[in-house]
Image: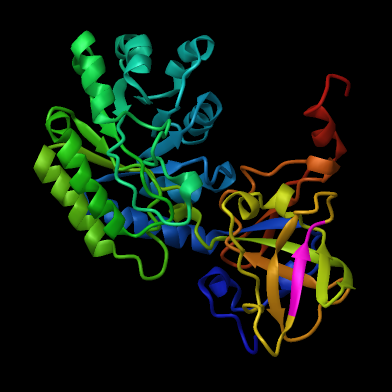
Amino acid sequence: MEGPDKRAPFASTGGYIPPEFQNIKTPCYILDEKTLIKNAKLLGEIAERTGCRMLLAQKAFSNYDCYRFFEPYLAGTEASGLFEARLGAEEMPGKEVHVFCAGYRADEFEELLRYADHIVFNSPSQLLRFGQMAKDAGKSVGLRINPECSTQEGHEIYDPCAPGSRMGTTRAQWDEAYKKNPELLELLDGLHFHTLCEQDSDALETTLVSVKEHFGDLASRVKWINFGGGHHITRPGYDIERLEHCIRLAQKEWNAEVYLEPGEAWALNAGFLLTSVLDVLKNGERWIAITDASAACHMPDVLEMPYRPPLLGADEPEAGEITVRLGGPTCLSGDVIGDYGFRRLPEYGDLLLFGDMAIYTTCKNNTFNGMALPDIWLRHADRSMQKLTDFGYADFKARLGSRR
């Protein structure tokens, strides 16, 4: 790719690897303050215009040193369990803490009540088991519903509305439980649905039609509706006007407060993974470059999603370019980041910069093969660099046994 890389993941660098990136140890994550604030302001403006309440889904981004950039614009955090709930409560004191878990543990629930304000249950049986305890503690209680409306293509692993899904309560499940336990309805303060994955607001609009069809009578009786996550609101071209229409429609239709809990949108295109080339080899007709970053360890969604992350200055593999397969240093044969088109063959020591690496990376990485976790840096708006944390052998060993 000739000239600066103008794609959104690299906009904050000017399309090049900036000088401040060039003398730090690799592999490392770099979070970009300016982009984080830009994303937060956009989400905050939507909340201000519509009166909805925005939450940060910590499962996608939980680098709490950066929560201060979001705090003026959000209502609170969303957690998937006890530890995330505690993190949100400790790092954003005074803000709301919402929790959803597919199954709560009895031995943790009392402690969870110390941190959470809103607790969403996945099933009528969980609501029946823990709902009254939550109500007695003064918490707002919700139920995750399954509107049985799939709008995704190619991300089946992330489709909560797929047949046989364990996520959320279908109308048939609710009706069966309610017949036996009519007191369930009195426990409900809100409804929650989460059906999207990196999607635009047209998918939300479609989902709302199904929510109304299957659960409209319940929605009109509760105080709040949570639209869940998966809204790619800060992506270039996202239809914000349609999103705001959906929010206002739900507010009017059900006279309820509306929550959204995006995760990726807060940190979309706001981070990088900087890596160095360790070796270049050729197997048959295929060029291969080994990097000190691992897909399996440092960007696991590349294998789980799967997807090919954007790489600064690299194109799609096309005729007339040098196609190079990038892979990590682990023993896993499938530790492959992807195939990229280069103008010149990478060399030992070259720096490569992957984009959109703030989300589902630092909160999801691992130490398979004894790989060290990458350092985490923050690039301030003035382009100064701050190391937030680093990791070593002790971090690897402490996860595996009792000896220090």
- Toward the viewer: 92 or 192? 192
* Residue drawn at (23%, 61%) of the image: 242
Q: Nearer the viewer, residue 343 or 304?
A: 304
| 25 drawn magenta | no
Magenta highlight range = 323-328
Image side of residue 75 versus residue 279, left or right: left
Left/right placement of residue 248 relative to residue 96 reads left
Q: Is residue 387 visible?
A: no
Q: Can I make out residue 239 in this image? A: yes
Where, by quadrant of the figure, is residue 353 drawn?
bottom right
Q: Position of residue 150 (x, y in %)?
A: 34, 48
Residue 92 location in percent, x, y? 47, 36
Q: Which residue is located at x 81 percent, y 63 percent?
A: 291
- Relative vertical location of residue 344 with respect to residue 126 in this rendering, above or below: below
Magenta segment main secondary structure: strand
The residue at the point 65 percent across, 83 percent down is: 318
Vertical relation: 404 (above or below) 233: above
**Where is residue 18 shown, x and y percent of the image?**
69, 74
Residue 81 is situated, as x and y percent measured from the top left of the image, at 50, 27
- Looking at the figure, which quarter contains the C terminus? top right
Q: Nearer the viewer, residue 260 or 173?
A: 173
Residue 127 found in image quarter = top left
Q: Does residue 327 show up magenta in the picture?
A: yes
**Quadrant into which the N terminus falls:** bottom right
Tell me: 136 left or right of 167: left
